[in-house]
Image: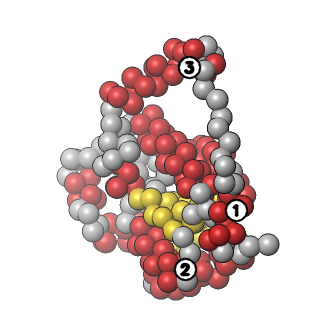
Amino acid sequence: MLLGRGLARYVEQFSGNALTDNVFHQAPSVCRAARERLNGHRALVIWFTGLSGAGKTTLANALEAELHRQGRRTLVLDGDNVTQGLCADLGFLVQDRHENLRRVAEMARMTVEAGVVTLAAFISPLAEDRAMVRSIVGAASLFEVYVRCPLDVCETRDVKGLYKKVRRGEIDNFTGISAPYDAPDSADLVLDTGVMPAAACVAILLQRLQSRMALP
């Protein structure tokens, strides 16, 4: 956590002079369109948002398996995995969660420029943070999926045992209980995983995404 905040202070201190004045954009020798032609499909960031236990990672992994079977170039970015590596220095305060998503969005922007269909499964509870993700990735490259599931259903699943810890007072700032979740009002797709099985959700996703991934 200290590393992340120290970096933020460093950027703030030097922004507008030594740091930014000596950093330049490097144009790639192979453009995104060329990579997409080689892959045979367009790249896209599919962003799954929803409560813990709603089924975001389950859908991302199942969708990736099917896309891989079709010969698509794919990558799954999962909240737990990112927290163990790229964002290991961050906690769960609002500013840390914001920085977590900023880093993930920048990574997703790079992977989509590399021609990869990127599936990102993150609670991403705040509307302003999801707007930031869209601004970094680019609206044309982002497909937002709201994985909607009632809190009580998510609690009955509780595959990680997190809700039990929350109810025992062992976890603070937990989305949906002690921290807010801003439900998307303009997601590209809403999947009700409280009533729909994963296979049906993946079938709908595949149907909606085929045109977005098709080359012109």
Q: Please provide percent x and percent y for residue 30.
A: 66, 54
Q: Quadrant of the N terminus?
A: top left
* Local crowd size for mark 2, using a 10 Å CA cut-off: few (<14), some (14–19), many (≥20): few
Mark 2 → mark 1, Cα distance in angstroms: 17 Å
* Local crowd size for mark 1, using a 10 Å CA cut-off: few (<14), some (14–19), many (≥20): few
- Check disc 3 and report the residue beneath it: 19
Outermost residue to the right:
216
Task: Give whichever of 98, 27 is nearer the camera.
Answer: 27
Q: Amino acid at mark 1?
A: Ala
Q: Earlier in the sequence, mark 3 or mark 2?
A: 3
Q: Earlier in the sequence, mark 3 or mark 1?
A: 3
Mark 3 → mark 2, Cα distance in angstroms: 42 Å
Q: Amino acid at mark 3?
A: Leu
- Check disc 2 and report the residue beneath it: 71
Residue 85 as seen in the image, left or right of residue 107: left
Residue name at image x 48 percent, y 64 percent = 75
- Check disc 1 and report the residue beneath it: 34
Q: Mark 2 or mark 1: which is in front?
A: 1
Helix, strand or loop status at disc 3: helix
Task: Give whichever of 138, 155 is nearer the camera.
Answer: 138
Residue name at image x 39 percent, y 23 percent = 6
Helix, strand or loop status at disc 2: loop
Q: Looking at the image, do the residues carrying marks 3 and 1 touch, with CB atoms under 8 Å apart? A: no
